């Protein structure tokens, strides 16, 4: 009996270790943090030690730090695969400009943010794009502008005056609403994906394995595991539910907006 | 000799006939079962949706978002048909017609792929509906 269990348990542990290693490797160099600049609280997104995006304004109910978390999650997911400089580009979005990695929107520059940083939306998006390219270790294209200095990379702080900031922060909430709509739309259509452990509790026993989940980037980042509750009625039917959770505990803490696309598991314990 | 041969042929024909009848009965039964389940899913989708939502809610695991119950067809794991609750934003959920599930078993392991799709034609590769997930499933064996 114990010998029969040894192989599946070893396989399950191997899968979990591989997942943990992959997650640690893929998300090592993108981070975000709160910082103080010119006496004001801002949020920074960093590649390695280099701040590549600085956010000063709230949008659609998200604080600068929450926005930075979302942007960092998107950037982390987008850079899990190898990214070339040409993959990072700027394109128009509703009421502003966005920075894309391939087809995935990473961050959008809207008027309140651009005003706060003393730039146009397009110029700010260009600046962020250049910073990301440099942060990834590439040179800027020859026809582009000169590479940003460290100070410029931090978000055009030198140019922004106190008056400009207050003007920027006071601009209409329509742009912020548009930002939220744009972001929500981008999140749902360009779904982030991740593999997480799955624990399945069934009549016959307990199974473990891995599940592929998908959803908005920030939500996917929160998911630590998937619980599967399952009842099998032999030769009649079966009932089951998938529950992505943010904590691995006996209390179910469901993460909304995340779905299960695929799974593979093995039986480790029979009842 | 001729009589023995005649008896053998008659027995073979009877067995073959019985086998064909059984096969036909199974196919007809399966078809009726699939059709019946799909009919019931379409007729009682709201009730099934409410049942799943309340069942998950009792365990503090209810989904937040637009939900809908659509037929699910499971292939590769013995054959199942039933109802799946899909969840997502309203316009995407509304477009979902069916969920296709592909299963495989290998020893004590199993693998499953869930594909909510906007087409009700089960042919070729199903096109995954964006922004929609499967939260729960009730299935009957074919």
Image: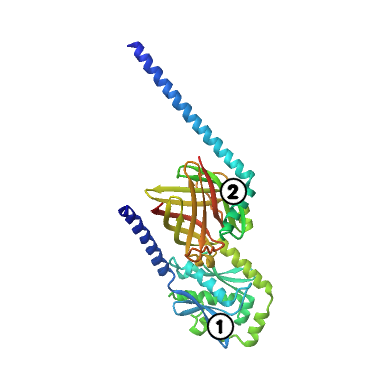
Q: Which mark is residue A244?
A: none
Residue appearing at x 56%, y 74% in the figure: A66
Percent across and percent down for residue A202 are: 46, 52
Front in this rendered view, residue B12 or A179:
B12
Label 1: which secondary element: loop
Locate residue A73 relative to residue B46 in the image: left or right: left
CA–CA distance in space, label 2 to label 1: 51 Å
Label 2: which secondary element: strand
Can residue B97 be seen from the camera position used here?
no
**Total marks placed:** 2
Q: Which image quadrant is residue A37 in?
A: bottom right
Locate residue B35 relative to residue A202 in the image: left or right: right
Q: Which image quadrant is residue A122 in?
A: bottom right
- Residue contact at pointers 2 and 1, CB within 8 angstroms: no
Q: Nearer the viewer, mark 2 or mark 1?
A: 2
Percent across and percent down for residue A187 are: 56, 64
Front in this rendered view, residue B19 or B89:
B19
Chain under disc 2 = B
Front in this rendered view, residue A80 or A60:
A60
Q: Which mark is residue A156?
A: 1
Residue appearing at x 59%, y 48% in the figure: B70
Can residue A265 be seen from the camera position used here?
yes
**How was the colour assigned to the protein in this rendering?**
rainbow
Locate residue A69 relative to residue A204 in the image: left or right: right
Residue appearing at x 38%, y 50% in the figure: B108
Percent across and percent down for residue A149 are: 49, 83
Q: Which mark is residue B70?
A: 2
Locate residue A114 relative to residue A151 in the image: left or right: right
Instruction: Establish if A229 lies above or below A134.
Output: above
């Amino acid at each position: 009996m114990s010998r029969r269990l040894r192989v599946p348990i070893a396989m399950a542990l191997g899968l979990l270790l591989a997942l943990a290693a992959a997650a640690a490797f893929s998300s090592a160099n993108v981070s975000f943090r709160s910082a103080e600049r010119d006496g004001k609280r801002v949020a920074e997104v960093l590649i390695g030690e280099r701040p590549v995006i600085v956010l000063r304004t709230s949008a659609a109910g998200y604080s600068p730090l929450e926005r930075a978390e979302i942007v960092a999650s998107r950037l982390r997911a987008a850079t899990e695969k190898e990214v070339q400089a040409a993959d990072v580009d700027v394109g128009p979005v509703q009421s502003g400009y966005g920075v894309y990695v391939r087809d995935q929107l990473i961050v959008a520059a809207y008027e309140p943010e651009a005003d706060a940083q003393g730039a146009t939306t397009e110029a700010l998006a260009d600046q962020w794009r250049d910073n990301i390219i440099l942060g990834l270790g590439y040179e800027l294209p020859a026809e582009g502008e000169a590479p940003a200095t460290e100070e410029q990379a931090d978000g055009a702080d030198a140019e922004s005056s106190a008056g400009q900031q207050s003007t920027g922060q006071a601009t209409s909430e329509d742009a912020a609403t548009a930002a939220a709509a744009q972001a929500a739309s981008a999140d749902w259509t360009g779904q982030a994906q991740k593999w997480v452990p799955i624990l399945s509790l069934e009549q016959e026993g307990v199974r473990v394995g891995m599940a592929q989940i998908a959803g908005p980037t920030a939500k996917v980042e929160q998911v630590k595991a998937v619980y599967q509750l399952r009842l099998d009625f032999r030769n009649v039917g079966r009932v089951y539910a998938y529950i992505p959770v943010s904590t691995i505990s006996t209390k179910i803490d469901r993460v909304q907006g995340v779905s299960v696309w695929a799974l593979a598991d093995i039986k480790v314990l029979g009842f | 000799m001729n009589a023995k041969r005649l008896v053998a042929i008659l027995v073979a024909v009877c067995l073959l006939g019985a086998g064909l009848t059984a096969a036909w009965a199974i196919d007809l039964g399966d078809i009726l079962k699939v059709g019946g389940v799909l009919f019931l899913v379409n007729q009682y989708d709201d009730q099934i949706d409410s049942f799943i939502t309340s069942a998950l809610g009792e365990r503090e695991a209810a989904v937040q978002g637009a939900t809908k119950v659509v037929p699910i067809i499971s292939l590769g794991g013995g054959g199942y048909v039933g109802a799946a609750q899909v969840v997502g934003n309203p316009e995407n959920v509304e477009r979902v017609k069916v969920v296709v599930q592909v299963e495989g078993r290998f020893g004590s392991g199993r693998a499953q792929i869930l594909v909510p799709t906007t087409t009700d034609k089960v042919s070729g590769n199903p096109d995954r509906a964006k922004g929609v997930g499967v939260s729960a499933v009730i299935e009957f064996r074919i």
